[in-house]
Image (cartoon, rainbow, N blue to C red):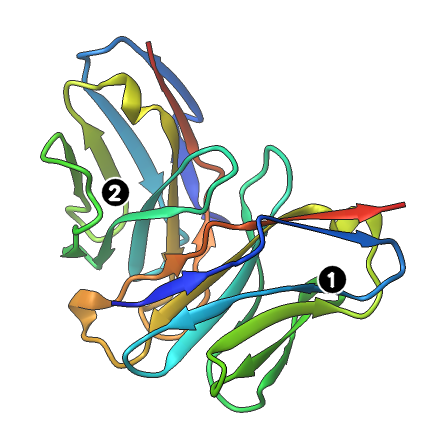
Amino acid sequence: AQSVAQPEDQVNVAEGNPLTVKCTYSVSGNPYLFWYVQYPNRGLQFLLKYITGDNLVKGSYGFEAEFNKSQTSFHLKKPSALVSDSALYFCAVRDKRLSERDDKIIFGKGTRLHILP
Amino acid sequence: GAGVSQSPRYKVTKRGQDVALRCDPISGHVSLYWYRQALGQGPEFLTYFNYEAQQDKSGLPNDRFSAERPEGSISTLTIQRTEQRDSAMYRCASSLDRLGNTIYFGEGSWLTVV
């Protein structure tokens, strides 16, 4: 069964500094990988996804993520953090190889990102 | 519709009552998912459908929970004989199909069992 781990409950970064939110995954085949963001009292918003091709994926609001197959990681990054980036971030995985009956998307427990002014 | 629509947005019910939560996915989306999310936690998978077929219900906590999507569009998640531990945000999501497509979430239904 597929699984995803976000090892950090919280990440604090000063405004203007680069940020990284970590994600590792486990699948039996090849993964589809996603990042979502949740602002306070709001729903989950899609940020970016890796399906195939270039390992560096660019998404909304200046975020990007790098797929690393050997390390089974898909860390979220941004070169220069903004206070408005403060939110809860979720990594998610779907296993490409599984049959239609096993085709669910599993989310990590989330990482709270605090950008300090 | 333009987005995934869920109703009711807020529901307070007494312990032991049945509740039905409705999800109207994005028009044309084949796949529909139900998740449960506790405060500050990640979405927990409950069940999902392709068209009207329920493909996986392994995440439903027990037999008080059921879901249907009879015409392959609107879905209903039903919780019978509610208990306080059922209190949570219930989120619905849909995607164009089951492949690498993005899943889009609704605003959720916040259930409180008193």
Q: Nearer the viewer, residue A95 or A23?
A: A23
Relative to A88, is B77 above or below?
above
Placement of the C terminus of chain A among the 4 image quadrants: top right
- Residue A39 position, x and y percent, is 64, 42
- Residue A91 position, x and y percent, is 50, 61
Residue type at the position of mark 2: Ser
Relative to A18, is A67 above or below?
below
- Residue A37 position, x and y percent, is 60, 52
Q: Marks 2/1: CA distance?
A: 32 Å
- Residue A11 position, x and y percent, is 69, 52
Q: Chain of mark 2?
A: B
Q: Are marks 2 and 1 on the same chain?
A: no
What residue is shown with label 2? B75
What residue is shown with label 1? A61
Q: Quadrant of residue B7?
A: top left
Q: Nearer the viewer, residue A21 or B111?
A: A21
Residue type at the position of mark 1: Tyr
